[in-house]
Image (tube, helix red, strand yellow):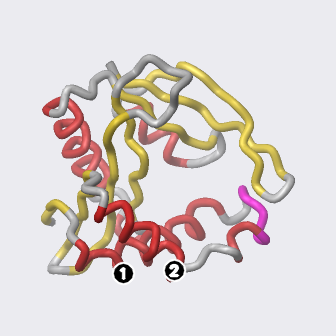
Amino acid sequence: MQIRHATLNDVSAIARIHVTCWHETYTGIIPESYLAQLDIIQKQIMWNKILNANQTVFIAEINGQAIGFANAGKNNDNNTPYPGELYTLYVLKSAHKIGIGKNLFMTAKSNLLNDGLFPFITHVLVDTPALGFYRHMGAEIVGEHLIDFNGLALKELQLLWK
């Protein structure tokens, strides 16, 4: 396994992983009508903008095949005093339970520390396996709110590492 900084050459792989992970993770939780709207081309445009804005994105590969990514930086939530945020961390289901998520998390955490963006937060829906993963990685719950997915309100937690 290799974790490295993502480049513009990785946009297609990141977009594919992003959409695939949403379907793998949120089917049965988020309405199918919402998931059906996810579009790889739109995600490519989004990730192209993110990488062109010099945001930090790490990509995980096994034998040259992209299987996960993480994106972290300055906290975008003006309602909290924490300087850093883990925006995304996704690993394809076929690569779960082999340390990819942990390694991506630790790489992003180290980068946030080096950039002076610690403590940091992330947001996670209550009914997903990611909550257990983040709790295992030492997160504490510091807030919650409802988020709307095509008319279905789901509880999202704000997690903190300090």
Question: Is the C terminus in the top left, top right, bottom left or bottom right quadrant?
Answer: top left
Total residue callouts: 2
Q: Quadrant of residue 30?
A: bottom right
Q: Main secondary structure of the magenta part?
A: loop
Would you identify the image quadrant in which residue 52 lies? bottom left
Q: Position of residue 96 (x, y in %)?
A: 37, 61
6 or 162, which lies in front?
Answer: 6
Place of residue 17 in the rendered image (x, y in percent of width and height, measured from the top left): 42, 72
Residue sitting nearer the eye, 138 or 154: 154
Is residue 28 depicted above or below 145 in this figure?
below
Instruction: Relative to 97, say whether 84 is above or below.
Output: above
Residue identifier under label 1: 12
Q: Which residue is mark 2?
A: 40
Q: Which mark is on residue 2?
A: none
Q: Amino acid at mark 1?
A: Ser
Residue 93 visible to the viewer: no
User: Callout 2 environment at 10 Å: few (<14), some (14 to 19), or many (20+)?
Assistant: some
**Range shown magenta:** 29-33
Say which element carries label 1: helix
Q: At 68% across and 70% down in the image, what residue appears?
A: 35
